[in-house]
Amino acid sequence: MSVISTVTVKVPATTANLGPGFDCIGAALKLYNEFKFTRHESGLIIQVSGTEAEKVQTDESNLLYQAFLKLYEFIEQTPPSVKIEIKLGVPLARGLGSSATAIVGGLVAGNVLAGSPLSELQVMELAIAMEGHPDNVVPALLGGCRLAATSRTGWEICDITWHRDIFPVVAIPDFELSTSEARRVLPTEVSRGDAIFNTAHFGLLLRGLATNREEWLRAALQDKLHQPYRQALIPGYDAVETAAVAAGAYGMVISGAGPTLLALTDELHTQAVVTAMTNAWKQAGITSVVRSLPLDIQGAVIL
Ligand SMILES: Nc1ncnc2c1ncn2[C@@H]1O[C@H](COP(=O)(O)OP(=O)(O)OP(=O)(O)O)[C@@H](O)[C@H]1O
Ligand SMILES: N[C@@H](CCO)C(=O)O
C-alpha cells in the first residue's frame, strides 16, 4: 500500500445558534481556511498566512496540530512528523467557527494521511468531543445547515432546509471575544418560562428557514438562553440590530459566541442591510467588515 505524503483540506466558517438554537444548530458559510499537511522528517513546522496569521500558535499547542494528534491517539498509531501550511480566511475568535475549522481540518487531514481508517461519522464524533458542542464542527464537516441532537447511542444529525431566498449577512467587528469568555457569563440553570420561549421560537425558526415565511422568521430570531447575557459583551449591539431591521432584515442574532452579528434578509435588502450594519457600528466607534455570505453546502473538502 502506498503511503500518502501530503493532503490539503479546505474547511468552511460556520455560524452557530441562529438565535434560539443554542449549542445545537449551525450553518456553513462560504468563507474558508485551508490546511496543507506534508510528511517530512525533521520535526513539526507550522507556517501561517492570510487573515491575522500572526495570532496563530506555531508550536505543538496549535489547535489544528492537537486535532491531528487526537486522530492518531484514537487509532493508536504514532503520528508522522509533519509540516503544516495554514491559509487563513476565517477570522479568529469572532463567532465564525475558527476553532471548528482547525479541529475538523486536523482530524480530516490526519485520517487521510493514516490511510482513512475512520468513517466520516467517527471523525465527526471526535470533532464534537474536542469542541465540546456540535453546532460548529458538524456543519464545518458536512456543509449546509445542520441540527445535532444526542440519541441513546450517539448523535443524530439532521439536514435543515434553508430556503434559497434567505440571505445571511455577517458583521465582523475588529475585536475578539473568546468562546470560553462568552460561555462564562451564561447561567447554569434557566427558568421554565425561558425554556418554553426557546422551544417555541426554535420550532418557528426551523419552519421559517424552510418556508421563508417572513412573519415566522421575524418572530423566530429571538433567544433567552444565551443572547441576553452576551449582549453586554458586544458594544453597539442594540444600535446594529435596530439599523439592520430598519434596513429590511428579518432579525439579527449573535453569530456563535460572538462578537460577529448575523442578520437574515432577502436578496432585495441585502446591500441596504450591509450598509446599515456597517454605519451603525461605525457610529458606536467600532470598525467592522460586513458581508453577505452564502451558505456552503460542501463542508470540509480534500483538495
Ligand atoms: N486555523 C487555526 N489554527 C490553529 N488554531 C486555531 C485556528 N483557528 C482558531 N484557532 C484557535 O481557536 C481559538 C478561537 O476559538 P474560539 O472558540 O474562541 O472562537 P471561534 O471558534 O472563532 O468562535 P465560535 O466558536 O464562537 O464560532 C483561537 O484563539 C486559536 O487558539
Ligand atoms: N454554541 C456555541 C458556539 C460557539 O462555539 C456558543 O454559543 O457558545
Image: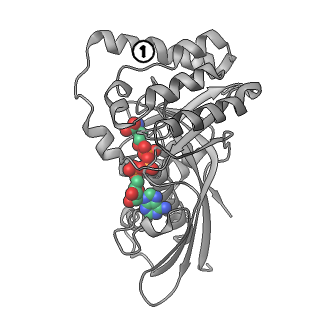
Q: Residue furthest right?
A: 268
Q: Quadrant of residue 59?
A: bottom left
Quarter holding ligand 1: bottom left
Q: Residue furthest left?
A: 188
Quadrant of the rendering where the N terminus is positioned: bottom right
Q: Residue at x 59, y 58 (%)?
A: 89
Q: Quick one: label 1, few (<14), some, or many (20+) residues within 10 Å?
A: some
Quadrant of the rendering where the C terminus is positioned: bottom right
Q: Residue at x 52, y 16 (%)?
A: 220
* Residue 124, horizontal then vertical, whole percent: 48, 48
Residue 24 or residue 77, whichever sits in front:
24
Question: Can the viewer see residue 25 in this picture?
Answer: yes
- The image shows residue 123, relative to residue 201, as above or below, that is below
In the rendered structure, the answer to whether residue 6 lies left or right of residue 96 reads right
Q: Which residue is mark 1?
A: 199
* Residue 294, horizontal then vertical, whole percent: 69, 39
